[in-house]
Image (tube, grey):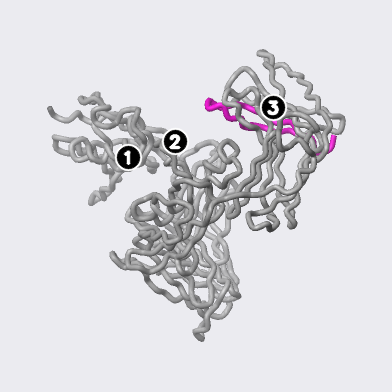
Amino acid sequence: MDEARVELVVTDPLGRARALASAPCEADGTYAIELLDAAPSDTVTLCALAPGFEPTLRGGSPPKDGQPWKLDLPLCPGEPLTGRLFDNRGEAVAGAQVTLLVPDRRAASGDLWAVHTTPSFADGRFSLPRAASGEVYLHAAKEGVGTAWLGPDELGAQALGEVRLRGGPALAGVVRRPDGSPVEGLTLELTQRTTGKASRKRTAEVWLAERFTHERGDGLLAASTSTDDAGSFSVTGLRPGPYLVRARPGGPALVGGAVPCAPGTTDLELVCNARSLRLSVVDETGAALGDARILATAWGAGGDATATTIEATSRVGGVALDLPGTCERLGLFVSGAGRQPWSGEVVLTEGAHVREREAVLGPSQAPGRIAVAVRVPDGLPAAVYRVAVRPASVSRPLLQFVIDTALESESPDLAPGSYRLELIPRGGPGRVDHHLAQTDLGPVLVEAGKSVRLEVEARLGARIELAPPVQAREDPAALGLGPDRSPAEREAAFARLAPSHGARVEWTRADADPADWRPLTFTVRGPSWRARRAWLLWGLEHGTSELLEAGPIRLRIDLPESEPFETEVALEPGRSTSVTPKPSAD
């Protein structure tokens, strides 16, 4: 049976049907599908789908002993369901998503199951397989146009004729920075606002996933758009009622967070905290270059933990890069246009919302590369490493590549010049902790058309387990650390408690003279969920240290209400050593 398939269907606690697995049918109609352990109950539902046939949903209980289970899924032939989509102005709608749905009679909520989806053609026509009988529904949607919804009464005929997509009036406005300059290229998400607290937090992706439950032919529940060069935006096809507009997470945010609005508003004024860099890409004569690839890495005060990657393409006249509001430093790497790549760094000062920079791409030269090999002792499984590359004149990495379990890899093309590299272990299949004899490499001189090969030795590392010997003297819930709090709320509570409860730990090599004390970072478990910090809360959590090189080290532990004390620990390769600090004095 051509193009037939069987899907494993489960119903979540909210009564919504979801497909966990899918398997094709053989020419004789047989199929084999794995019954996943993730199925939430003893009853399994299977859905059979095939062009020209009515979808079939059937459930049952598989054997408890793991034996093969046979379930026949009969299909009834049907004729195609055809029609043509138009918008409010009577123009054909191309590229709309048209979906055929059937009820999932096993779901307590009466949820609908999407069994066939197809795009409309250039003239608005569509064709979907369906049976001549049975309860079916049709949903059609196109961003910027609207939606259509047809139930069993309207779907009595196989040829539907004209189907009208409907949506509300435009919602338009402009986004500016605090200094009044426009924000271009900012992605905005609009979601319908409801009274429930949880629904106000929903993103456009969540609404789109649930559109079959809510959209009923009067417009879209959610949409996204981007601002133009003047900072302007416009969205059409929304449902009537109040909406929230917000900037897409991970980038600049709107002042005030999500802003209420409604379709029909055409003068919405939004303020964004974005910082911007206007970058002009030119050749050595000063002529503007287009179509060059721009890779920017923005860092905040938290260093690599707050790094954000931004990609763009140069245009004649320059391109504006909108940066996160917390950005303090920006690394730039510009390549392409058949010329030598350029790299640079920009430091952003407080209050400067727009900066300008020029990237000069010199005459083309043959690129060079850096190959890095990691030597692992015999008998130890391989690990995976991330290699961060930066020009020697820049303080932050501009690009990265990965060394997989083959233990050798080569960087992308690099412009001739001097570079520095940092190797960061990422673990591996055996979860073996490797300590590199050298993590910072360079400066490395890259010559045109040549590849430089570097070798680094890997050894088994060691960690420290720090376990405070006393229990918390306060109720964790009273401190804001209860299990009902979100991870962000618990982290905020830990930060407030740090001055009076924080136990800081530093380390140095035992033979270091003078001692080179460095903070020891821990991964903590307990009320704080999971986080990496350079301190622990006394009596409330246990911690596992970062990876260290095996051998004797000295620890200096600063406990609340007591003087710091030192202790010596012998770290063994591939093991974690438990350390119990002295309790603080009452």
Quick one: SS at disc 2?
loop
Q: Are marks 2 and 3 in contact (CB under 8 Å)?
A: no
Q: Amino acid under label 2?
A: Gly
Judge the density around disc 2: few (<14), some (14-19), many (≥20) Cα neighbours within 10 Å: some
Mark 3: give few (<14), some (14-19) or many (20+) Cα within 10 Å. Answer: few
The residue under label 1 is 552
Q: Is 13 part of what is drawn in magenta?
A: yes
Residue type of the residue flagged with mark 3: Glu
On screen, 69 above or below 414?
above
Q: Quadrant of residue 19?
A: top right
Return the x and y of residue 300 as percentages of the image width and height. Answer: 35, 56
Residue under the image location 46 percent in, 60 percent down: 266
- Camera-nearest label, 1 or 3: 3
Task: Characterize the magenta stretch by its predominant secondary structure.
Answer: strand
| Identity, as a three-letter code, of the amino acid under mark 1 | Pro
Q: Secondary structure at mark 1?
A: strand
Residue 567, percent from left and from top = 24, 36
Looking at the image, which is closer to me, 304 or 104? 104
Q: Which residues are magenta?
A: 1-23
Q: Residue at x 74, y 19 (%)?
A: 68
Q: Does residue 442 appear in this view? A: no
The residue carrying mark 2 is: 574
> Does dot 3 land on a helix, a strand or a loop?
loop
Q: Is residue 524 left or right of residue 194?
A: left
Instruction: Give the vertical position of 200 relative to 249 (above or below).
Output: above
The residue at 62%/17% (across/down) is 42
Marks 1 and 3, the one that precedes in the sequence: 3
- Residue 34's mark? 3
